[in-house]
Image: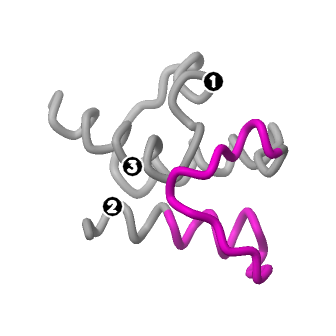
Amino acid sequence: MSDILIKVRTLIHQDILKGSHKTLSDDFNLIESGILSSLSIVRIVAFIEDTFDIDVDISDPRKYFISINKITDYIENKLLER
């Protein structure tokens, strides 16, 4: 398990779900389920930019912030592009 995955999972469970006891798989669709609000997406963008020093394009969240695994893949790919 990657360090990035652990950080993203922790963000989702602690900051977005506020520590609720919902058990989500890493492939659970956060958009379709309604878990991610526009404010939640802004939090994720700020987390990614601050933690990994990555610039998130304005259209990227809609395309890539679907699940914990997809967010993790997005970060890993952006880091490889450097």
First-in-chain label (1 vs 3): 1
Q: Quadrant of the C terminus?
A: top left
- Point 25% across, 34% down: residue: 77
Q: Main secondary structure of the magenta part?
A: loop
Tell which residue pokes out farthest to the top in this image.
59
**Mark 2 and 3 residues: CB-CB less than 8 Å, in contact?**
yes
Splitting the image into 4 quarters, where does residue 32 fall?
A: top right
Mark 3 residue element:
helix
Give the percent coordinates (x, y) of residue 11. Answer: 58, 66
- Point 78% across, 75% down: residue: 18
First-in-chain label (2 vs 1): 2
Give the percent coordinates (x, y) of residue 19. Answer: 74, 81
**Residue underneath mark 1:** 62
User: What residue type is disc 2 on?
Assistant: Ile
Along the line of sight, which residue is nearer the eye, 81 or 17?
17
Mark 1 residue element:
helix
Splitting the image into 4 quarters, where does residue 1 fall?
A: bottom left
Q: CA distance from mark 2 to mark 1?
A: 20 Å
- Report whether 6 appears left or right of 9: left
**Residue underneath mark 3:** 72
- Point 17% across, 28% down: residue: 81
Q: CA distance from mark 2 to mark 3?
A: 6 Å
Q: Count neighbours of disc 3 (C-alpha within 10 A) and say few if under 14, some if 14 to 19, many if 20 or more.
A: many
Q: Which residues are magenta?
A: 9-33
- Report whether 1 appears left or right of 24: left
Splitting the image into 4 quarters, where does residue 25 fall?
A: bottom right
**Residue underneath mark 2:** 4
User: What residue type is disc 3 on?
Assistant: Thr
Q: CA distance from mark 1 to mark 3?
A: 15 Å
